Image (spheres, grey):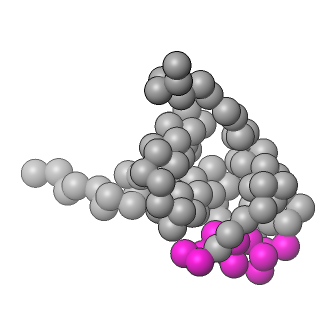
Amino acid sequence: MEKSRPYQEYLVAALADPLEAASYLNAALEEGDKELFLLALRNVTEARLGGMSKLAEASGLNRESLYRMLSGKGNPELKSLDRLLHALGLKIAVEVDGHTA
């Protein structure tokens, strides 16, 4: 019988795909929980770049600032979030809410 892969290993492999990463982050945003979204960003960072050091290099943001920004208590500014997402090959977008009149 084949051993199963640990969930985190499977998740990181799946999130290497930019479409999967974007869907994952959008699902986290829809939950409305900032800590969950920041955890999702950390997972995408691991999958797409291999960790915070590479994200710091790719985004031009300070590594220590990234750790604070993506911690459970983090509160990234829009400009920093945009730079971070750009480094991950993603972008911020606004969509029409289906609940509009």
* Residue situated furthest left in the rendering: 1
Question: Residue at (89%, 61%) from the top-left corner?
Answer: 60
- Position of residue 63 measured from the top left corner of the image (x, y, whole percent): 78, 74
Depth check: 94 or 13 in front? 94
Magenta-span inclusion, residue 44: no
Which of the 4 image quarters holds residue 80? bottom right
Q: Position of residue 89 (x, y in %)?
A: 72, 41
Q: Residue furthest right?
A: 60
- Give whichever of 35, 6 is nearer the camera: 35
Residue 64 appears at what percent x and percent y? Answer: 77, 80
Q: Quadrant of residue 84?
A: bottom right
Residue drawn 78% across the image and 62% down it: 77
Q: Position of 71 compared to 64: left or right?
A: left
Whether residue 15 is visible, yes or no, is no
Q: Tell me the residue at 52%/19% (across/down).
A: 101
Specify whether residue 67 is painted magenta. yes
- Count the labels in the image: 0
Task: Indicate whether 22 appears above or below 77.
Answer: above
Write the residue at 72% across / 48% down.
85
Q: Which residues are magenta?
A: 62-73
Q: Relative to 99, is 91 above or below?
A: below
Can residue 72 be seen in the rendering of this structure?
yes
Q: Vertical placement of 47 versus 35: above or below?
A: above
Q: Position of residue 22 (x, y in %)?
A: 57, 39
Image side of residue 1 versus residue 68, left or right: left
